[in-house]
Image (spheres, rainbow, N blue to C red):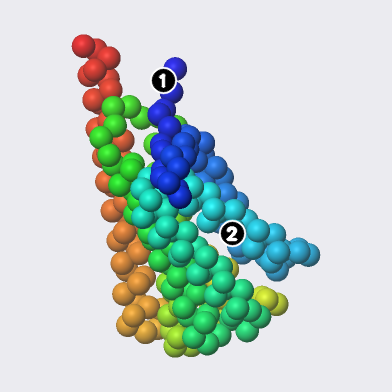
Amino acid sequence: MQTLPNRTINIAGKQVSLPLRQGYQYLLGTLLALTVLYPLQDEFEGGRLTLGIILTVVMVTAVVSVARKRYQFIVSLLLAIAFIAMRNAAMPDNTGGVAIAGALAGSLFFFYVGVILLFSIFEKRDRVDPDLIYGAISVYLLVGFAFAYLCLSLETAGPGAFANILDRTGESNDMLPGFVYYSFVTLTTLGFGDVVPVTRPGEVLAYVEAIAGQLYLTVLVARLVGIHLSQQNSSGN
């Protein structure tokens, strides 16, 4: 069985070795947990605390998993720290400039990590392995969360940008679970229509996310098929 090479990153002048396979596996696991628990945070006691812990674990895992260069590690870490700090400062009202900045920082973090991971996936590879699959699914989930925070920042800056979103706000006065739901429904082009954008910026975000979701799946499948065919040809020779 082929073993994937470790990655090394220079932190404070020291070369740190990170196992690539484990990083993507853990990243996917924490992202899946976050996806399931976000809408349920008000459904059980201690839900917000549990969610906050999982969100922190997701960000730490993402930084460690995808940062291949020192500047990538520093940028992703700073975005994670800024997001967590402003997210906590905006509680419990989740309104005002701090809340907007926190949502934008969260969106930038997920987009930045997703882009780094995407380039890693589409690098020259000679085989389809679990590491590639873990990373590909993680990118899809990262995009969904990035758009959710982007929509949250738009609604916070201009209340009423999305119709019916307040109906999905629970006791925590947090609109994010509703936007996580809306984002993944849009990304997968299900479009139930219970939450809808009613402003031009919101409409632009909706169709851009839908296009991005479909393009990603199309290009990803083509890439995986190409690698698989190349792998078969190499085995045949």
Residue located 41% across and 36% down the image: 7
- What is the quadrant of the C terminus in the image? top left
Query: Looking at the rendering, which quadrant does residue 68 occupy?
Result: top left
Kind of residue at disc 1: Gln
Which residue in the protein does label 1 denote? 2
- Measuring from the top left, give residue 96's x and y in whole percent: 52, 87
- Measuring from the top left, give residue 94's x and y in whole percent: 58, 81
Nearer to me, 70 or 157: 70
Nearer to me, 173 or 70: 70
Residue 61 falls left or right of residue 186: right
Among the two numbered marks 1 and 2 on one chain, the one whose residue lies closer to the N terminus: 1
Residue 229 versus residue 107 in the image, above or below: above
Kind of residue at disc 2: Leu
Residue 56 versus residue 8 in the image, above or below: below
Give residue 177's mark: none
Structural crowding at the residue carrying mark 2, measured as other residues with C-alpha within 10 Å and reported as few (<14), some (14–19) or many (≥20): some
Judge whether residue 169 can be spotted in this image: no
